Amino acid sequence: MRFAKSTVVTAALLAACVAPPTGRFQPPGDVDPVAARYINPGTLTALPGFTHAVRIGPTVYVSGEIALDSTGHLVGPGDLRAQATQAFANLATVLRIAGAAPADVARLTVYVVNYAPRDLDVVRAAAPDFFPERNPPAGMVVGVQALPLDGLLIAVDATAVVRALFHPRSGPGPR
């Protein structure tokens, strides 16, 4: 009898000493809505050591997209407009795969080698979907000395927030 009591007491003490699981409980098969999803389209060349995008919940963080085609070749050597067109096309592809669109971009940063103010018009003309007249994204154009690969003139990174697939009801509705 004494042995049975000590076993029960020992089991209770051990159970009390085990740390509770951290975070919320997730039943098997449940998808964590804030787990990071790494997006690397096979049709786009990534800079070594970087992921094209990471989506956490509704937010998509896109790395600097550059003017490389699907085979990894530079598009438009020496031509800012051609490179901007390709970089923004790559950005649009990554956003689409992440479930977002150019209209979902909340922040946009454009890096231009040897930037001059006239370059902004060239960049905007190459990607009008990213620069709407009404409600454009927050952003910045940064002049840089160089980018990670020789010949690159532009890189574009973005943060997008994916809009909900439904619209909340306005006012009381039928029940």
Image (cartoon, rainbow, N blue to C red):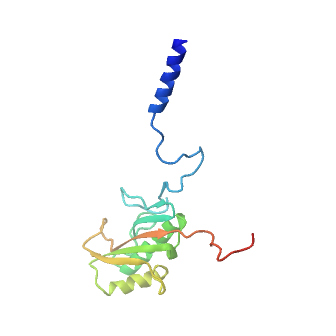
Residue 117 shows in the view: yes
Q: Where does the image place residue 120, in percent across and percent down from the top left?
A: 36, 84
The residue at 51%/76% (across/down) is 103
Q: Nearer the viewer, residue 149 or 51?
A: 51
The residue at 36%/57% (across/down) is 48
Quarter of the image for the C terminus: give it: bottom right
Q: Where does the image place residue 32, in percent across and percent down from the top left?
A: 54, 52
Name the quadrant containing residue 46: bottom left
Q: Where does the image place residue 94, in percent across and percent down from the top left?
A: 49, 66
The image shows residue 157, relative to residue 12, as above or below, that is: below
Residue located farthest toward the left when viewing the structure as drawn: 145
The residue at 50%/24% (across/down) is 11
Q: Which of 61 and 49 is in front in this view?
A: 61
Name the quadrant containing residue 123: bottom left
Residue located farthest toward the right when viewing the structure as drawn: 175
Quarter of the image for the N terminus: give it: top right
The residue at 48%/41% (across/down) is 21
Residue 90 shows in the view: no
